[in-house]
Image: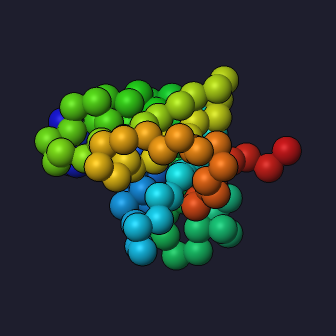
Amino acid sequence: MEWSDLTEGAKAVLEQTRNIKNDKIQIVEFEVGFQQEPEAAGDAEPISIQEEDYQSLKRFTQENEYGDKYHMARNKSIVKIVLLEKGKIPENLSELPVFREYKNQK
């Protein structure tokens, strides 16, 4: 699967996993059903992450053509995704900070 096949919501999430600096693993957490408020988006298009975006991400992480390895975990509507370094899931994944969140305010 190629980048151009992804939905816009899936691209928004994946772009955040690619900001690896200083060998830091970055976790992106999002809620399926997230809809960014237009004011928060500024001049950009508001981000929306729906079930179709999750399915697009799931497919991309399993069959992307770039050799990147991802780990995705879903609990109800909350999903965490991380770009793996050297293809291995860190032992202390739950202790790593979340780099970016796309979650609805309750």
Q: Quadrant of residue 58?
A: top left
Image height of 74 relative to 71, above or below: above
Find residue 84 and report its horizontal and vertical position in percent. 37, 48
Q: Residue extending furthest front?
A: 91
Q: Residue extending furthest left?
A: 65
Instruction: Compare residues 20 and 1 and report the one nearer the observer.
Output: 20
- Evaluate whether residue 24 shows in this view: yes
Image position of 59 (left or right of 90): left
Q: Quadrant of residue 41?
A: bottom right
Residue drawn 53% across the image and 31% down it? 73
Find residue 81 and report its horizontal and vertical position in percent. 49, 43
Find residue 57 and report its horizontal and vertical position in percent. 38, 37
Instruction: Compare residues 6 and 19 and report the one nearer the observer.
Output: 19
Image height of 87 relative to 38, above or below: above
Q: Residue extending furthest right?
A: 106
Image position of 97 (left or right of 3): right
Image position of 76 (left or right of 45): right
- Evaluate whether residue 9 shows in this view: no
Q: Residue extending furthest top?
A: 76
Instruction: Compare residues 20 and 12 and report the one nearer the observer.
Output: 20
